[in-house]
Amino acid sequence: IIGAGRVTLWGALAMAATATVGKLFGVSV
């Protein structure tokens, strides 16, 4: 459960970071 939670957490952070960078550079992700 801990491993799966960690993967889910990092996956969510990665998607949030990608979306943020996309907004900053005006690129739709």
Image (cartoon, rainbow, N blue to C red):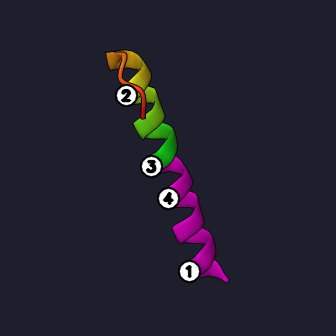
> Disc 2 residue type?
Val
Q: Element type at marker 2?
A: helix
Q: Nearer the viewer, mark 1 or mark 3?
A: 3
| Labels 2 and 1 touching (C-beta < 8 A) | no
Residue that badge 4 annotates = 10
Residue depicted at 52% across the width and 69% down the height: 7
Residue that badge 2 annotates = 21
Q: Element type at marker 4?
A: helix
Return the mark for residue 19. Answer: none
Residue that badge 3 annotates = 14
Does the magenta stretch mainly form a helix, a strand or a loop? helix
Task: Find residue 26 and report its horizontal and vertical position in percent.
Answer: 37, 16
Circle 3 crowding by C-alpha within 10 Å: few under 14, some 14–19, many from 20 = few
Stretch in magenta: 1-14
**Which of the 4 quarters of the picture holds residue 25?**
top left
> Disc 1 residue type?
Gly
> Disc 4 residue type?
Trp
Q: Quadrant of the N terminus?
A: bottom right
Q: Element type at marker 1?
A: helix
| Labels 3 and 4 touching (C-beta < 8 A) | yes
Cα–Cα gap, marks 3 and 4: 6 Å
**Which of the 4 quarters of the picture holds residue 23?**
top left
**Which of the 4 quarters of the picture holds residue 8?**
bottom right
| Labels 1 and 3 touching (C-beta < 8 A) | no
Residue depicted at 63% across the width and 79% down the height: 2
| Labels 4 and 2 touching (C-beta < 8 A) | no
Return the mark for residue 3. Answer: 1
Sequence order check, earlier mark of 3 and 2: 3
Task: Find residue 29 and report its horizontal and vertical position in percent.
Answer: 42, 35
Circle 2 crowding by C-alpha within 10 Å: few under 14, some 14–19, many from 20 = some
| Labels 1 and 4 touching (C-beta < 8 A) | no
